[in-house]
Amino acid sequence: MTLPPRDPLPSLIPESAPFSAEQRVWLNGLFAGLLSLEDGITPLSLEQAAALLPGALDLATPATGEDDGAPWHDPAMALADRMKLAEGRPLRRRMMAAMGQQDCGQCGYNCQDYSDAIVLQKEERLNLCVPGGKETTRMLKALHQELGKGPGSAETPSKTLTPAAVTAAPAAAPGCSRECPTAARFLSRKRLNKAGSEKETWHIEFDLTATGIDYAVGDAFGVFPTNDPALADAVIAALAAPRDFPIGGRALRDVLVDGVSLGAAPDMLFQLFSYITGGERRQKAKALAAGEDPDGDAATLDVLAAIKKFSGVRPDPEAFIEALDPLQPRLYSIACSPRVDRRRMALCVDAVRYPINGRTRLGVASTFLGERVRSGDTVNVFVQKAQHFGLPADPSVPIIMIGPGTGIAPFRAFLHERMASKAPGRNWLFFGHQRRDYDFFYEDELAGLKAAGTLTRLSLAWSRDGAEKFYVQDRMREVGRELWAWLADGAHVYVCGDAKRMARDVEAAWVEIVAAHGARTTDEAIAFVANLKKSGRYQQDVY
Ligand SMILES: Cc1cc2nc3c(=O)[nH]c(=O)nc-3n(C[C@H](O)[C@H](O)[C@H](O)COP(=O)(O)OP(=O)(O)OC[C@H]3O[C@@H](n4cnc5c(N)ncnc54)[C@H](O)[C@@H]3O)c2cc1C
Ligand SMILES: NC(=O)c1ccc[n+]([C@@H]2O[C@H](COP(=O)([O-])OP(=O)(O)OC[C@H]3O[C@@H](n4cnc5c(N)ncnc54)[C@H](OP(=O)(O)O)[C@@H]3O)[C@@H](O)[C@H]2O)c1
């Protein structure tokens, strides 16, 4: 029997508190009793919780060990909150908390293994975390100072690094890791939005024939992009350096195009400027290198803007290149199934472009794929095996896929795979985007999959068609009873797309649905969803 919907009870335990779902339920109950809980009460601070129940925090936060639950391992959590949760832990755990928490593999590791490799001194580079960006690099540098100093700093990971799982070391087969990429031929791009859309999203295809690459649905595809040559030229002009200045046997311009990141100016660049300029400008460069923001413009300073800010400073081109971060590969969810054609690779890429101070800034990889690479060009690529994202082993298990925007990519692959393998399991897709008339990706194809019976249900949400925003989770709430019935039938849930807002809001909607239709309190529903995750029935590919 299902219960009617009701207002969720407030949770007393702060989101950031390092408790498991079960501990959260138990503590909420306890504190509610102690405080005679009424609607509207605000969550306790960690300190209040600890004061009410001394020892509760200790229960949930063992000082060391592999099984501390890594409560900071949430890509939607801010760095400061993650570091707070890791306070008092061994250095390698705090280093892990400093990572972007996406386990995306763009650095060649997952978050835990990258931090372990740094502590084991097997990895010297502290600037590899793409999602974490500058703030992660800065935090890692600060933590790195502790390495080899004081008690507790020498603790080593109890397990050995496992390259097979995390690609920490070069894999044997080309294209199996970022350390060992292979060259694939770029085939085509086709815009997925119709003219008039505010978005620019591309269906991208590569030819894998010559690569020997093997992949599965759920995996991601790593692409080594090159910078916009016009940006490299603008940097050269701003430096007043010769474009063929030799850098390690290559011309400066070539290194600027394919070797270094021209995105956010790294602290090292400001440090370099501080050495070769004087007075107030030197103080500003030093402040920027220390992560301060003397003029309130730090967030707008890419490499070119930084050179212009310190115009007239002429660093040696070699020292300049050394001060920049390496150009990193980017990952894209694979949008096709090898069962359909293993020589093809398809991606769904949203081109990042945004104006700052009159100059359009370009996302390096998304505009490389969406604009610069030409049909027939070869591109260095690799497959990043998914760690916890893939179809259920049993093809009869129903699946529910929630993928607004580019989040549709892996679900196109899932649907193709299930169609090609004649999997009997039911498939329900939630897709959404800004406007139905312009942003309905793969509309004809989805209609075909529906007609063929592969796509059992398609639920759509257009955020900008009405007077008010309407998102996939709003559509989910409307059909909550049926979603609950699918869950009761053992359905697996998948979420793909934006990590910062969408994934959180979708999870909150699941909690409401489970509470409303599964006859559970909010806390029981939270524990239910947490258990779905733990058992692998709720998987996310979010970025
Ligand atoms: C596992 C995984 C799967 C992914 N799958 C996909 C996918 O299927 N499709 C897809 O499109 N992407 C996907 N991504 C994201 C993708 O990897 C890239 O992060 C994305 O394409 C941007 O990379 P870029 O090089 O173009 O931009 P970058 O050069 O990295 O620039 C992006 C940076 O620009 C800044 N920025 C962006 N917009 C603004 C703005 N409006 N104002 C100010 N600053 C801004 C932000 O700092 C942002 O981090 C995935 C990521 C992961 C980890
Ligand atoms: N690192 C990068 O630079 C980079 C590059 C590309 C994408 N991304 C991330 O990836 C995400 C995916 O981009 P995308 O082009 O696929 O689409 P998107 O920008 O996420 O938009 C897809 C749909 O999701 C809606 N949406 C916005 N907030 C939501 C929420 N809280 N819950 C549910 N839906 C919500 C959007 O509505 P409205 O827009 O109308 O609100 C839109 O209809 C981006 O949001 C961004 O965070 C990052």
Image (tube, grey):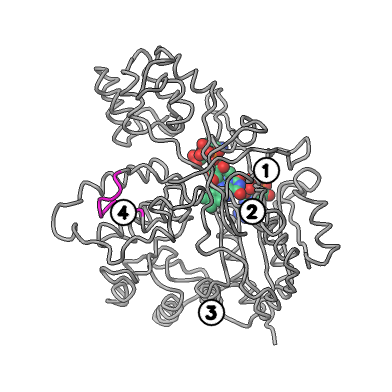
What amino acid type is highlighted by mark number 3? Glu
Image position, residue 428 (x, y; %)? 73, 66
| Disc nearer the start of the sequence (1/2) | 1
Helix, strand or loop at disc 1? strand
User: Is residue 227 shown above or below 278?
Assistant: below
Question: In the image, which residues are magenta?
Answer: 114-124
Q: What separation in Å lies between label 2 and label 4 (alpha carbons)?
A: 31 Å
Kindly report the distance in space between the C-alpha atoms of the residues bearing marks 4 and 3.
38 Å
**122 drawn magenta:** yes
Q: Mark 3 points at which residue?
A: 524
The numbered disc on residue 205 is: 1
> Quadrant of the rendered structure where residue 305 is?
top left
The residue depicted at 55 percent of the width and 77 percent of the height is 528
Q: Which of 83 and 348 is in front in this view?
A: 348
* Residue projecting furthest to the left: 150
- Mark 2 Cα-neighbour bin, 10 Å: few <14, some 14–19, many ≥20: many
Return the disc, 1 or 3, that comes first in the chain's sequence. 1
Q: Which amino acid does label 2 sit on?
A: Gly
The residue identified by callout 4 is 117
Q: Distance between the residues labelled 1 and 3?
A: 44 Å
Residue 66 drawn in magenta: no
Three-letter code, disc 1: Glu
